[in-house]
Image (cartoon, rainbow, N blue to C red):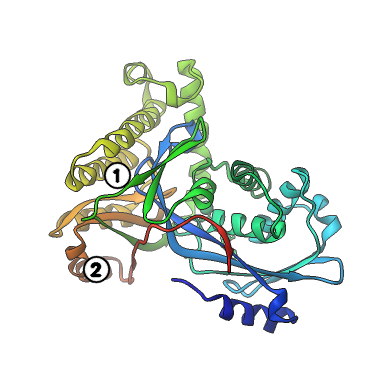
Amino acid sequence: MVLTTESLSDAHRRKWGGSSADVKVYRAPGRVNLIGEHTDYTEGFVLPIALDLTCYVTRSKNASGELRVVSENNGQERRWPSSALPVVQPMGDWSDYIVGVAKELFRAGYPVEPANLRVHSTIPLGAGLSSSAALEVATALALLDGRAIPALDLIQLCRRAENRFVGTPCGVMDQYVCVKAEAGTALEIDCRTLESQVVRLPEDLAIVTVNSMVRHELGQSAYRTRVAECAEARDKLGVRSLRDARMEQVDELVGVIQQRARHVVSENGRVKAFLQAESSAAMGALCYESHASLRDDFGVSCGELDALVEMARGIEGVYGARMTGGGFGGCTVNLMRPGAVAGFEARMRAGYRARFGVDPAISICVPSAGAGRQA
Ligand code: ADP
Ligand code: MG
């Protein structure tokens, strides 16, 4: 869903005043990961696409020395003297993403000028489609306001904001694809070298997300636990990261640590197999395998996600499905024939409502371009 510059600028001026010539619009996309889940923080491989769901941050000058921000999505407003941003402490809410980015900009030599910001995102918040990285990147661009920055610096700076200030030990995938995606393609990212290549997708492939509409509390703490478990497996194996582990080595581990390592090593293999797959059906089969691995070995699925994947499996024209994002709720990603989408939507909606009593949000993905200024 694309919001026009005019409507965003009007809404900005209703809130903050000024003329339309004063308002600039910056945008950053959400993303869905096709395969390579929970592999970025162990320096592995991932294959996301950027979405046409977008976080917009509009910006105008502020004459009173403050950084002010309002979010359309939650109706909340915050303000700080901009010179005090480097010493603001985390609040444990959405404003941490804004302040975290501002602090990292100061640290990187891009002091933050007073400004009025308005955030309006069409990405569902907390659904595994990375509204957080989109908020970071769009905020960084709005605060930079045209000052040039190397893409990798922008990516790393936004990731550091989330790691250090928000306190989520996320890998680099979300910020990377948000900045560097190209329209119409997926992006294979090597999370060690930070190199990437654009990947063309088959013509006959529709990518559809189904939002379970749940977010289990366990998710936050489990993410941290998984990061720690992967580090433990790495240390036991004496490798630089799980990226370097071979399956024969994993076989020597025991218990939960072995399961976690087995997921990461097998998942990296599935990314490579996906890239070499000769048919959409073969890609889909790898998605089902990825889901089973995330459910059984990595332990990050939940009843709703498992049910969505099983429902998809029974539908004509569907090649594959898996949970996507951190897990414990959020979305599944489904690969299918374009002609199968309408039937898929109807059956998934009816099936999920019958079983869980809620309407799942279903959306067809348009592989979109990375972040930038919207003219
Ligand atoms: P995801 O990135 O998958 O959407 P996260 O839990 O990582 O889920 O990030 C969601 C959080 O990001 C929200 O709870 C909120 O704090 C913040 N956020 C993202 N977009 C916005 C927005 N437009 N307005 C306010 N907060 C936002
Ligand atoms: Mg996030």
Closest to the observer, 21 or 165: 21
Residue drawn where x is 70% and y is 60% of the image: 145
Q: Callout 2, which amino acid?
A: Glu
The local secondary structure at tag 2 comes to helix
Q: Earlier in the sequence, mark 1 or mark 2?
A: 1
Q: Is mark 1 within 8 Å of ligand 1?
A: no
Q: With 85 as the anchor, is 91 left or right in this view?
A: left
Classify the position of the C terminus by image quarter: bottom right
Residue drawn where x is 42% and y is 50% of the image: 325
- What percent of the width, then of the height, locates residue 373? 59, 63
Residue that carries the numbered disc 2 in the rendered image: 345
Classify the position of the N terminus by image quarter: bottom left
Q: Callout 1, which amino acid?
A: His
Please say if 30 is above or below 218. Answer: below
- What percent of the width, then of the height, locates residue 316? 12, 59
Quarter of image, res 212: bottom left
Residue 328 in sight from this viewpoint: no
Please say if 250 is above or below 172. Answer: above
Are the residues at dot 1 and dot 2 in contact (C-beta closer than 8 Å)?
no
The local secondary structure at tag 1 comes to helix
Q: Residue furthest left?
A: 316
**Number of dots carrying numbers:** 2
Quarter of image, res 157: top right
Closest to the observer, 349 or 27: 27
Residue that carries the numbered disc 1 in the rendered image: 291
Closest to the observer, 43 or 105: 105
Q: Is mark 2 within 8 Å of ligand 1?
A: no
- What percent of the width, then of the height, locates residue 215? 44, 58
- What percent of the width, then of the height, locates residue 169? 57, 41
